[in-house]
Amino acid sequence: MSKYTYTNNYIKEYQNFVPKELAHRIITQKDLSFNKATTVGGKLSLHRHCLIKTLDTQFDQEIADVFSNVFRNYIKEFPFFDSITGDTTGWDHVLYMGDKGQEYKEHVDLSTALEPRILTCSLILNDDYEGGDFTFFEGEYKILKKAYSAIVFPSNNCFPHAITPVYKGDRHVILTWIR
């Protein structure tokens, strides 16, 4: 039995939460100008090798509805999170390019520089890439990639996680934190 067995219970994957057509429109939009991703405070990181952009506002309402549905489901499973107001950090479109072997080495999502993050949520828009696994606890726990799914977990030091290098294709996700 893993020392993380109990903790794994708080990592949830909800399949088919992102409408396929919405994911396709986000991935194929004309303006996909990304910037090098940084960490809190705008620092370039030795751990974070991917690209990021604020999601185009044309998708705000649809993505807000998806995240709302995801968080509602999470709170049903864990009612002690019911005090969450729904305030998010906004929607980031994150791109991991396979031809560059992009990844995000193990880290935690705890942030003391801003309002505390409570939950992390990542919407997986596609799965037509190789590598790019979502892993926790030094790779001991892995979530198999599934397009249109949502991954949710508490944003604290108890949930170290990583995205392994993408080595073929591109991995697209929408990321937010709820405060």
Image: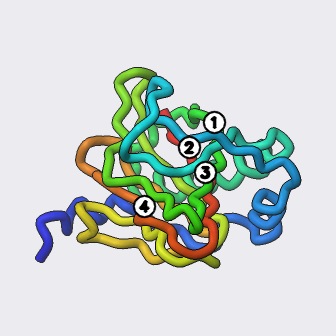
Task: Name the residue type under label 2.
Answer: Thr
Q: Residue at x 24, y 70 (%)?
A: 140
Q: CA distance from mark 4 to mark 2?
A: 16 Å
Please name the residue that numbered disc 4 is placed on.
Answer: 163
Q: CA distance from mark 4 to mark 3?
A: 12 Å
Please name the residue that numbered disc 2 is placed on.
Answer: 176
Task: Name the residue type under label 3.
Answer: Val
Which is nearer the N-term, disc 2 or disc 1?
A: 1
Compared with 35, 175 (above or below) is below
Which is nearer the N-term, disc 3 or disc 2?
A: 3
Please name the residue that numbered disc 3 is placed on.
Answer: 94
Q: As rendered, which of 43 and 81 lies closer to the eye?
A: 43
Crowdedness near tag 3: few (<14), some (14–19) or many (≥20) residues, C-alpha within 10 Å: many
Crowdedness near tag 4: few (<14), some (14–19) or many (≥20) residues, C-alpha within 10 Å: many
Secondary structure of residue under mark 3: strand
Q: CA distance from mark 4 to mark 1?
A: 21 Å
Which is nearer the N-term, disc 4 or disc 2?
A: 4
User: Is 164 placed left or right of 26 in the picture?
Assistant: left
Pointer 4 with pointer 1, Cβ within 8 A: no
Q: Residue at x 68, y 55 (%)?
A: 66
Secondary structure of residue under mark 2: strand
Crowdedness near tag 2: few (<14), some (14–19) or many (≥20) residues, C-alpha within 10 Å: many
In this picture the colour scheme is rainbow
Task: Name the residue type under label 1.
Answer: Gly
Where residue 135 sits, quadrant-wise, is: bottom left
Task: Name the residue type under label 4.
Answer: Ile
Please name the residue that numbered disc 1 is placed on.
Answer: 90
Location of residue 164 in the rendering, given as x and y in whole percent from the top left corner: 41, 65
Crowdedness near tag 1: few (<14), some (14–19) or many (≥20) residues, C-alpha within 10 Å: some
Which is nearer the N-term, disc 4 or disc 1?
A: 1
User: Is 153 placed left or right of 174 in the picture?
Assistant: left
Query: Does residue 146 appear in this view?
Result: no
